[in-house]
């Protein structure tokens, strides 16, 4: 089943499902040494990358309640791109676009960006006789078995909230007297 990639450019495009076009992604892939076919797989790579990006909590608020994706946003200070400047609410950050393309390359390599992790993932030894189960140290230490994407994380770090829905803020020391 083929479907179209509809690119969000910051103008709140109806039914947008990507921040990058297939053509732009294929160009990025080629620059990074990939020779991807232009078959139905390429849009799937982009959509899986979007699923990952849409799972994040970004600074600011969506511009419209009717927009399809989390960007564009208003009230987002993206300090890594231009210090102390409010990001335009009619634009998509270049780092977000690059992150989507990098994630799509990972998907093309067969990497599951959001694998389901269950307690069975931590089972080191299982004995059926008088029922015995031993879990790995990772389970005891609550270590995540989710994949880590250093390049993507560095691209997104200045757009992501601290987990409490708050953006970064500046502290100013004031002296009186």
Image (cartoon, rainbow, N blue to C red):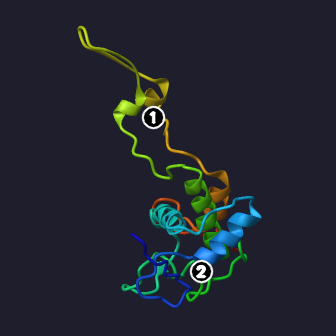
- 153 horizontally vs 63: left or right: right
- Location of residue 78 by image quarter: bottom right
- Residue 175 seen in the figure: no
Question: What residue appears at the point 45 percent right and 34 percent down from the top-left corner?
Answer: 142
| Label 1, label 2: how far apart the Cα atoms are | 35 Å
Report crowding for label 2: few under 14, some 14 to 19, many 20 or more residues within 10 A (C-alpha): some
Query: Viewer-proximal residue, 20 or 66?
Result: 20
Which mark's residue is nearer the viewer, 1 or 2? Answer: 2
- What percent of the width, then of the height, locates residue 48? 48, 62
Vertical placement of residue 76 versus 41, above or below: below
Please give the count of numbered marks on the rendered protein. 2
x and y percentages locating residue 153 in the rendered image? 62, 57
Give the labeled residue for mark 2.
Answer: 92
The residue that appears at 49% across and 36% down in the rendered structure is 143
Quadrant of the drawing holding the C terminus:
bottom right
For the residue pair 41 and 163, the one nearer the viewer reads as 41
In this orientation, does residue 138 appear? Answer: yes
| Residue that badge 1 annotates | 142
């Amino acid at each position: 089943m083929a479907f179209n990639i509809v690119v969000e450019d910051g103008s709140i495009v109806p039914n947008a499902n990507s921040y990058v076009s297939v053509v732009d992604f294929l160009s990025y892939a080629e620059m990074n040494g990939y020779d991807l076919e232009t078959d139905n797989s390429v849009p799937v790579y982009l959509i899986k990358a979007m699923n990952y990006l849409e799972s994040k909590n970004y600074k600011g608020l969506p511009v419209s309640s009717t927009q399809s994706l989390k960007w564009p946003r208003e009230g987002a200070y993206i300090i890594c791109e231009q210090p102390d400047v409010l990001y335009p609410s009619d634009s998509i950050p270049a780092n977000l676009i690059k992150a989507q393309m990098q994630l799509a390359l990972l998907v093309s390599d067969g990497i599951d960006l959001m694998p389901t992790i269950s307690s069975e993932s931590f089972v080191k030894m299982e004995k059926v006789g008088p029922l015995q189960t031993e879990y790995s140290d990772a389970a005891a230490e609550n270590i995540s078995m989710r994949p880590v994407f250093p390049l993507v994380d560095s691209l997104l770090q200045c757009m992501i909230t601290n987990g409490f829905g708050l953006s970064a803020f500046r502290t100013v020391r004031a002296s009186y007297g």
